[in-house]
Image (cartoon, rainbow, N blue to C red):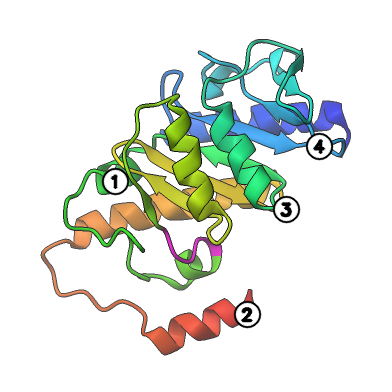
Amino acid sequence: MNLAALRESICRMGESLFNRSLTFGSAGNISVRLDDGGLLVTPTGASLGNLDPARLSRLDSNGQLVDGDKPTKEDFLHREMYRQRADAGAVVHLHATHSVAVSCLADVDPTNVLPPITAYYVMRVGTLPLVPYHPPGDVDLARAVGEMASSHHAVLLANHGPVVAGRCLEDAVYASEELEETAKLYLLLRGMPLRPLTAEQVARLTRRN
């Protein structure tokens, strides 16, 4: 996909996420890795519902701005995911309501926050570790993400939201959507007897990926 088409794709996906209330205001950011090792990323202070393709931030392989507006202040999260995951072609970071709500719970398993409720969650997200809280923009947050990103393509930032990498933009968006829906299911089911998938069922699904 050429650069112009990638710009349009980011804006289209951003608008879709915004219109379905998976992000709001100027929260959330999206990036795509370019063939030269650089990034195309959403700008700081921009609403995903109203992105201008020409104003998306293009960074070189060192994270320096080549053209477009100033990038999101959380671009370091994206760059750390790419650094740890050679297979990642896109990263989506949202502040989606149910995912953030789960990230604030005191009794979740920090090694795998959500149980394997559905097959599609297992196939698109797998395990979801909780990254300890750091303020937005803090370099220690990038380090904490980096410690988990090599073995997990999706992580949940405590009291903040998910960061999800995918082979392409569609993969990253679909996995982010699946994570949010599973977080919603988990909250709806709290206090009820839960029948998650068994370890054997999870293993079979994982081998299919």
Between the C-alphas of marks 3 and 4, the distance is 11 Å
Between the C-alphas of marks 4 and 1, the distance is 31 Å
Residue 166 sits above or below residue 101 on the image: below
Q: Residue tagged by mark 2?
A: 208
Residue 74 sits above or below residue 120 on the image: above
Residue 112 sits above or below residue 99 on the image: below
Q: Is residue 86 visible?
A: yes
Instruction: Name the front one of labels 3 and 1.
Output: 3
Tell me what residue is drawn at x 79 percent, y 25 percent.
Answer: 60
Can you give x and y, in whole percent of width and height, for residue 25 in the image?
42, 19
For the residue pair 20 and 144, the one nearer the viewer reads as 144
Residue 103: which numbered mark, if any? 1
Position of the N terminus by quadrant: top right
The amino acid marked with disc number 1 is Ser
Can you give x and y, in whole percent of width and height, for residue 40 in the image?
72, 28
The amino acid marked with disc number 3 is Ala
SS state under label 2: helix
Q: Badges 1 and 2: C-beta atoms under 8 Å apart?
A: no
SS state under label 3: loop
Can you give x and y, in whole percent of width and height, for residue 62 in the image?
75, 27
Q: Which residues are magenta?
A: 124-128
The amino acid marked with disc number 2 is Arg
Q: Badges 2 and 4: C-beta atoms under 8 Å apart?
A: no
SS state under label 1: helix
- Magenta segment, principal secondary structure? loop
Q: Earlier in the sequence, mark 1 or mark 2?
A: 1
Q: Residue tagged by mark 3?
A: 86
Residue 9: which numbered mark, if any? none
